[in-house]
Amino acid sequence: MDKENVELLEEAIRRFNATSTELEKSYRLLEGQVRHLKDELEIKNRALQESTMEQDKLREQAERNKRLAAVGEMSARIAHELRNPLGSIELFASLLKKGLEEPEKQSWAEHIQTAVSAMDYALTNMLFFTGKPSPHFQKTDLKRVIEEASLFAVHLLQQKEIKFVLSLESLTEPILCDEDLLRQIFVNLILNAIDALPKEGHLTIDAVAGTRQVQILVSDTGCGIPEDQLSKIFDPFFTTKNKGTGLGLAIVYNAIVAHSGTIEVKSKLCGGTVFTVTLPMNPERAVE
Ligand SMILES: Nc1ncnc2c1ncn2[C@@H]1O[C@H](COP(=O)(O)OP(=O)(O)OP(=O)(O)O)[C@@H](O)[C@H]1O
Ligand SMILES: [Mg+2]
């Protein structure tokens, strides 16, 4: 080969090498881009899948909520219907008790009254739980409301011979509240305390009144609440009782929130429990 051709060939090889290096570079770049696009596509596919699953889940949840709302409405209607005949049974049981002479027979009538109270309590809780608590605030004597709540449990207190002390002297000012909701708070706290107490246990309700808020302390010397359950007791349907619905404290919590109040619990296993309910004197001002 002559010199000129050799140079040409060398130049051609150089160019070929340069081009192939360029090509190699472009190929690597393209490969990187394809990999990147593939990854992106995979992420988007996954997101799409997740969002479809999320949508399915949401649809399922909406369906379940609709069914629950229907069941709730039906139970509320049944609860409402059952309360009237229960009222009559309670009335006739108290008339019967008055008409009976023998103490043993009188205690039978009392048993009917206790059972009616228990049913009424369960039905009222159900009505409060299924209906939204939309409070109607009125100036109310809180002392009277708590006394009425304890009257509700009077048969149970007597049956268990519980030492019951009410110290509500400091409640002299009326507070703005929904009377029905507040009564239900204290009925539930008192009944829970009675359940937790042994025979002849102690139940105390104390009040501390300030200028802007009141504190009610419901203390029992009962079995206490294990520490790992403390965070669950206000959850709806959490119960450790055979015949409990687990709605009591959920209702208490909602009613207190509806009053812009707070509830705290301190408990010692086998050493008793104290529920502290703090309520503003005027919940409407507390919200502002
Ligand atoms: N004073 C208390 N002492 C000990 N445990 C309590 C006390 N108050 C509540 N608990 C615990 O909290 C759980 C939830 O209470 P909640 O009132 O919500 O439901 P319940 O009492 O089990 O059922 P229901 O209110 O329908 O009778 C109870 O099952 C109990 O384990
Ligand atoms: Mg309860």
Image (cartoon, rainbow, N blue to C red):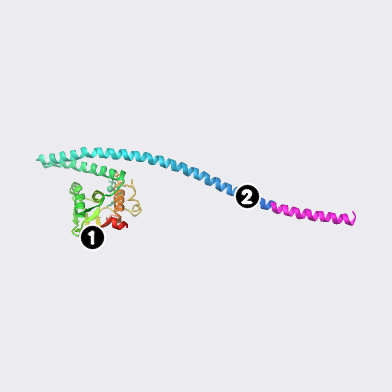
Q: Nearer the viewer, residue 5 or 119?
A: 5
Provide the residue designation for mark 2.
35
In the displayed structure, does residue 232 sit left or right of residue 196? right
Q: Which residue is depicted at the point 23% across and 56% down?
A: 175
Task: Tell me the element at label 2.
Answer: helix
Residue 28 pos. (x, y %): 68, 52
Q: Is residue 271 visible?
A: no
Report crowding for label 1: few under 14, some 14 to 19, many 20 or more residues within 10 A (C-alpha).
some
Count how many numbered circles sit on residues in the image.
Answer: 2
Of residues 56 and 135, the one nearer the viewer is: 135
Query: Which residue shows up at 75% across the image and 53% down it?
Result: 19
Dominant secondary-structure state across the stretch colored magenta: helix
Mark 1 or mark 2: whose residue is earlier in sequence: 2
Residue at image location 52% in from the left, 45% down from the top: 48
Please provide percent x and percent y for residue 134: 29, 48
In the image, farthest residue toward the bottom: 211
* Rendered location of residue 245, percent (x, y): 30, 44
Per the image, the residue denoted by label 1 is 208
Residue 137 pos. (x, y %): 25, 52
Q: Helix, strand or loop at disc 1? A: strand
Give, as a three-letter code, the residue at label 1.
Val
Residue numbers of the magenta segment = 1-26
Identify the residue shown where x is 13% and y is 40%: 95
Residue 16 located within the stretch drawn in magenta:
yes
Name which residue type carries label 2.
Arg
Left or right of residue 28, residue 212 in this image: left
Q: What is the residue that sits farthest to the left in this orientation?
A: 101
Distance, label 1 to label 2, CA atoms, is 70 Å
